[in-house]
Image (cartoon, rainbow, N blue to C red):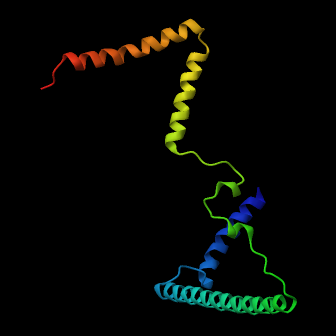
Amino acid sequence: MASFIAKQLVGKQMDSVKGAVGGGEATGEDAEKLAEQQAEIAEALAEEKRKRDEKHRKMEAEREEMRQGIRDKYNIQKKEDPLSMMPPDDPAGRLGRKRKTPEELAAERDLEDEEDFTSVLPEGMRDTVKNVTAVPQKMLADAKEKCVIQ
């Protein structure tokens, strides 16, 4: 109990000391300086990246020039990348199957629905179901023939 009270008293005193040292709120000038520093850092990083990329591009160009010299010296043909030779839409080079369009997926789903419903029925009932589902279409066709829409 005594240690709890001691921690509470010391903790409050520490909070008041922390603000006096200068670790308090940042002013508008500090925020501007911080923003400027961050902008300078971002600009310096972008410049370093640009220089690094340029350096790597030059090194790769020199290496390719050296490789070509060796190929010419020993009459070696440059290997062609097999993926770059095939057109990108060629399904033969794909590992997976061709993706179906939404229309194909919908047609397949409808076909599965019909098969699921009729597959559990006996043979005679399947014919009856087909006839019953055709009745509304026949009635609609008869109504269009008999009625004149004005």
Q: Please, which residue is most extreme toward the left here?
A: 150
Reply above or below: 50 against 147. Answer: below
Q: Please, which residue is most extreme toward the right here?
A: 74
Query: Left of 34 or right of it: where is 9?
Result: right
Q: Residue at x 54, y 23 (%)?
A: 114
Reply above or below: 55 against 135. Answer: below
Reply above or below: 104 against 29. Answer: above
Q: Residue at x 43, y 11 (%)?
A: 132
Q: Residue at x 69, y 64 (%)?
A: 8
Location of the N terminus (image quadrant): bottom right
Q: Please, which residue is most extreme toward the top here?
A: 124
Taking depth in this image into account, of 120 and 49 the one nearest to the observer is 120
Picture mark count: 0
Query: Left of 114 or right of it: where is 86?
Result: right
Percent position of residue 46, x then y: 60, 87
Percent position of residue 57, x then y: 69, 88
Reply above or below: 25 against 47. Answer: above
Residue 116: image quadrant is: top right
Query: Left of 81 or right of it: where is 131?
Result: left
Percent position of residue 102, x then y: 51, 43
Taking depth in this image into account, of 55 and 34 the one nearest to the observer is 55
Query: Left of 31 or right of it: where is 78?
Result: right
Location of the C terminus (image quadrant): top left
Percent position of residue 62, x then y: 75, 93
Q: Residue at x 50, y 84 (%)?
A: 31
Q: Please, which residue is most extreme toward the front here?
A: 75
